[in-house]
Structure formats: structure tokens, C-alpha cells
Image (tube, rainbow, N blue to C red):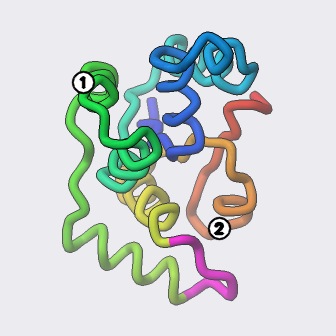
Amino acid sequence: MKPHHLDSSIVIPFVSAILGTREEKRVVANQKALKWVSSCRAPIKISMATYAETLRHFGDIEEVEALLRETFSAPLPLTASVARRWSRMQNRSERTMGDNDAWVAALAVMERGVVVGHDRNAFHERPDVEYVDYLRN
């Protein structure tokens, strides 16, 4: 089973569904993120970029960091080989990706995995990138 590499566009709603306000917990996208993560049978991974984006979004709260580590283990490091893949992906496309999206995609490609999120514009029609939109599946 291919590993699933989560973009912050699913991780942030997932965290909001668990640690958010009562209103945030009821948001449909947040509930779907929670359901998707809870029911996924494939190995789930997050990159250091997704980890950092999520912490930044919530203000670096210890509860958030604990939830991320408990749910996803340690974030995957951004290594030299991933940096080379990141560079190739950015250089061979007419439309470059946002840096953090490119890190997530590069890690997924290196591990022959799938990117999961809700940011079709960032990942759609990228060479070698398999993408699943958790809100549409």
C-alpha cells in the first residue's frame, strides 16, 4: 500500500476537528479530515514542511505538537536527496509550486506515495505526483 503524504490543507482541518472551538469542530471540511485520517489504512506521513505550517497556523501550541506526534509520529526530514527532487520538480514545470507544497510532493514522489490534501491547484497535473483530494473522495 502506497504511503499517503498529507499536505497542511488536510492536517490543519484535522487538528481543528479535534482541538478547535465547538464551531470549528462542526465545520464539514474539518469533520471530513478527521474521518479521512481515522479511516485511512495506508501508512500516513507528514513532512517537516506540513508540520511547521500546522504549528504556525495554530500559534505553536504544545497541544497541537503533541497531537501531531501522537497521530503521525515524527515528521519526515527534508534531506539532500529530497532537495534534489524538489529542485527538479520546480525546474521542469512551467508553473512552479509553492515551496512547502513542493516539499510535500517531492517526499511523496521519492517514496512512491500519494499526496493528500485539498489544494488541487497546487498539485493537479504535476509530473509524477499522484494526488487525492480528501473532500472529493
Instruction: Give the left or right position of residue 17, taking residue 32 as reference.
Output: left
In this rendering, is residue 98 above or below 44?
A: below
Q: Left or right: where does residue 81 sit relative to residue 9?
A: left
Q: Residue at x 74, y 61 (%)?
A: 121
| On screen, residue 122 above or below 131 | below
Disc number placed over residue 23 in the picture, else none: none
Tag 2 residue: 126
User: What element does badge 2 sit on?
Assistant: loop
- How many numbered circles are shown? 2
Counting from the top left corner in percent of width and height, residue 94 is at 68, 88
Crowd class of label 1 (few under 14; some 14 to 19; many from 20; radius 10 Å):
few
Q: Which residues are magenta?
A: 92-98
Residue 132 among magenta residues: no
Say which amino acid is labelled 1: Ala
Distance between the Cα atoms at labels 1 and 2? 33 Å
- Using residue 77 as the reference point, say whether residue 39 is left or right of it: right
Provide the residue designation for mark 1: 66
Q: Nearer the viewer, mark 1 or mark 2?
A: 1
For residue 25, above or below residue 134? above
The earlier-in-sequence mark between 1 and 2 is: 1
